[in-house]
Amino acid sequence: MNLGPWIAMIAVVLAGGATALQAPTNAKLAGAVAGPVNAAFVSFAVGTAALGIVAAFLHARPDMTAVRGLPPYAWIGGLYGAVFVVAAAWAVPRLGVATTITLMVAGQLLISLVLDHFGALGVPRAPISLTRVAGVALVIAGVVLVRRG
């Protein structure tokens, strides 16, 4: 039995849980450091320090030949993360954790459908289908249900 996919799924579920924890944590931080942008800065500084320690421990070194061959869009992943953290820190006090995270997941799914459909940014093509759209529609319906309480 290949455990790889199961381990990946568990890791992603745990990462999703961390996202739910990250939103209210950064919202609380935003109140103390004068706003969501400052909270995101502190959050990324702590994350960068943690990743630096892990990279040093693992002796991880970038392949500079591969780095030089990257397309320009490969350099802006951190920008997406910054937008995510600022938006979550700002939205949680206004919408609550469940609504904020559900809306973020809905946004992720909508963009994911488009990326998959066109095979954008190097991902494997997976055409939009009625089944996939229905799945996203159910998540969006979940936003409505979560918001109504």
Image (cartoon, rainbow, N blue to C red):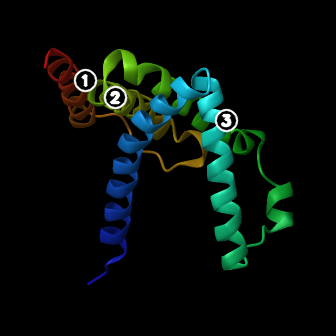
Q: Which residue is mark 3?
A: 41
Q: Where residue 83 appears, x then y in whole percent?
A: 58, 28
How crowded is the residue under tag 3: few (<14 C-alpha within 10 Å), some, or many (20+)?
some
Q: Which residue occupies 15% across, 15% down?
A: 148
Which quarter of the figure has residue 2? bottom left
94 or 133: nearer the viewer: 94
Q: Where residue 81 appears, x then y in whole percent?
A: 58, 38
Which quarter of the figure has residue 65? bottom right
Q: Which residue is mark 2?
A: 106
The answer to whether residue 77 is visible is: no
Q: CA distance from mark 2 to mark 1?
A: 6 Å
Q: Which residue occupies 62% across, 51% down?
A: 47
Q: Is residue 75 left or right of residue 101?
A: right
Q: CA distance from mark 1 to mark 3?
A: 30 Å
Sequence order check, earlier mark of 2 and 1 = 2
Q: Where residue 116 appears, x then y in whole percent?
A: 45, 40
Sequence order check, earlier mark of 2 and 3 = 3
**Disc marking residue 140:** 1
Q: Which residue occupies 22% across, 35% down?
A: 135
Q: Please identify, in this view, whether the residue under mark 1 or under mark 3 is nearer the observer.
A: 3
For mark 3, give the secondary structure: helix
Give the residue type at disc 1: Ile
Q: Residue furthest bottom?
A: 1
Q: Is residue 109 left or right of residue 124?
A: left
44 or 8: nearer the viewer: 44
Sequence order check, earlier mark of 1 and 3 = 3
Which quarter of the figure has residue 82? top right
Give the residue type at disc 3: Phe
How crowded is the residue under tag 2: few (<14 C-alpha within 10 Å), some, or many (20+)?
many
For mark 2, give the secondary structure: helix
Rendered position, 60 above or below 139: below
